[in-house]
Amino acid sequence: MSGGDLSVVYGIGELVVGPGEDDSDGPLEIREDAAFAAVDGEVVAVASSEAITREYPPENAATAIDADGRAVVPGFVDPHTHAVFAGDRSDEFAAKLGGAEYREILAEGGGILRTVRAVREAGDDRLVASLAGHLETMLAHGTTTAEVKSGYGLDTETELRLLAAIDRADARQPVDLVPTFMGAHAVPERVDAEAYVDEVIGEQLPAVAEQGIAAFCDVFCEEGVFGVDQSRRVLEAGRERGLEPKIHAEEFTRLGGAELAAELGAVSADHLLCATDEDVDALVESGVVPVLLPGTAFGLGEGYADARAFLEAGAPVALATDFNPNCHSRSMEFVQTLGAVEMGLTPAEALLAATRNAALALGLEDGTGTLREGAPADAVVLEAPSYVHVAYRLDTSAVEAVLKSGEVVYE
Ligand SMILES: N=CN[C@@H](CCC(=O)O)C(=O)O
Ligand SMILES: [Zn+2]
């Protein structure tokens, strides 16, 4: 046994290790009567419970969990959230149920623009506390890594404040955060889209890049928001500054955002409700991860993205919550339920989409989203004998405990 802090989880009835390694596995590699050991937060061995407890005696471990036949899965990765915001838009939810349309609300100065006004009025500490509160709920549903976008600032100062709030929240709680700059989330009322794109490129991006507080650059490519050429300008400028591209594409209309993602080799293209077969092929050929957001479609009463078309074309389909004031879901469990019940994914495909494929949508190449040797020891112990309970449970959470880097951070 090597030195360092040892964690051992043993007596696992069903351990989801990661994606299936050959056709006979199916989407997931699953081991029964299994265990894993981690040293200093990294998985060092996965084997039978008997072999692991012999080599890594639980009594020597800083963290030892007897799963007693329960299932253990990799921690969930939520690759698309707008979790740092202020204010309340529950009245818009009610209005939408009564027939109001998302883009009409935005065009009238509501929606994203309303959240922008609330964020500008909120103090920094309140933004951090609000985000940390949401992360606590996400963790309780098994999320151990989450992307968080800025985009409710729409000016340099407020975009930087949002990214700083993400950074502070990252440091003070266990969920690992991946920050994305999304100055091009909406067009502020003071200026037109073209002039605002100039501002994003000329002022916001240089300031964000200088502070080194974002990994990705995202844009809302949508009719009435940013067109394809404007989106291309933003994403190319982001890349020049070291921020890899992501894109909100084909959500309400098929505008060409998916083709743009393929052209640029974006890390992911997200939403994709209106993507065509040609879009699916283009994304697969260029290795862009499709991130599907069933909570948004569910909340808006829209049709879902065609997950099966992506899977049949060989895409590593990822799922995310899209948590934001328009889609108040922080639960990657709920997203997997929707993926299975509404989008036709098997529970195994949904779990893969919420773990390894979601990590790919964030460019995480360190094994995050698996429990293979060398991966971060981020794991969810379920209060159930099978991973299927994640998608199967329609009422309460199936999460019993969560480990982050080998430590119990929720139970
Ligand atoms: N569609 C654009 N952005 C968010 C919604 C943000 C909001 O309405 O506050 C999304 O991905 O769903
Ligand atoms: Zn979004």
Image (tube, helix red, strand yellow):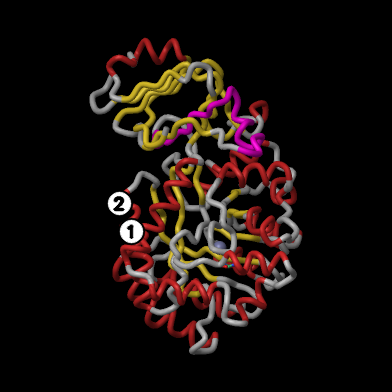
The residue under the point 57% across, 25% down is 384
Q: State whether residue 294 is above or below residue 151.
A: above
Q: Which residue is mark 1?
A: 167
* Mark linked to residue 101: none
The answer to whether residue 284 is left or right of residue 408 is right
State if disc 2 and disc 1 touch (CB < 8 Å). Answer: yes
Name, please, the residue furthest toward the left.
3
Residue 313: x percent and y percent? 71, 49
Q: Position of residue 124 (x, y in %)?
A: 32, 67
Secondary structure at badge 1 equals helix
C-alpha span from label 1 to label 2: 7 Å
- Quadrant for the N terminus, please: top left
Helix, strand or loop under label 2? helix
Q: Give the residue type at disc 2.
A: Ala
x, y percent for residue 325:
54, 63
Q: Amino acid at mark 1?
A: Asp
**Where is ligand 1, by quadrant?**
bottom right
Please give the name of the residue rendered at 49% of the width and 16% of the height, measured from the top-left corner: 68
Viewer-proximal residue among 106 and 145: 106
Q: Quadrant of the C terminus?
A: top left
Q: Give, as a single range, the part of the protein colored magenta.
A: 375-395
| 196 up-or-down from 254: above or below | below
Q: Nearer the viewer, residue 285 or 374?
A: 374
On residue 171, which mark appears? 2
**As rendered, which of 335 and 50 lies closer to the eye?**
335
Q: Which residue is painted at 53% across and 61% down in the image?
A: 324
Q: Position of residue 340 (x, y in %)?
A: 70, 41
Crowding at mark 1 (Cα within 10 Å: few <14, some 14-19, many 20+) = some
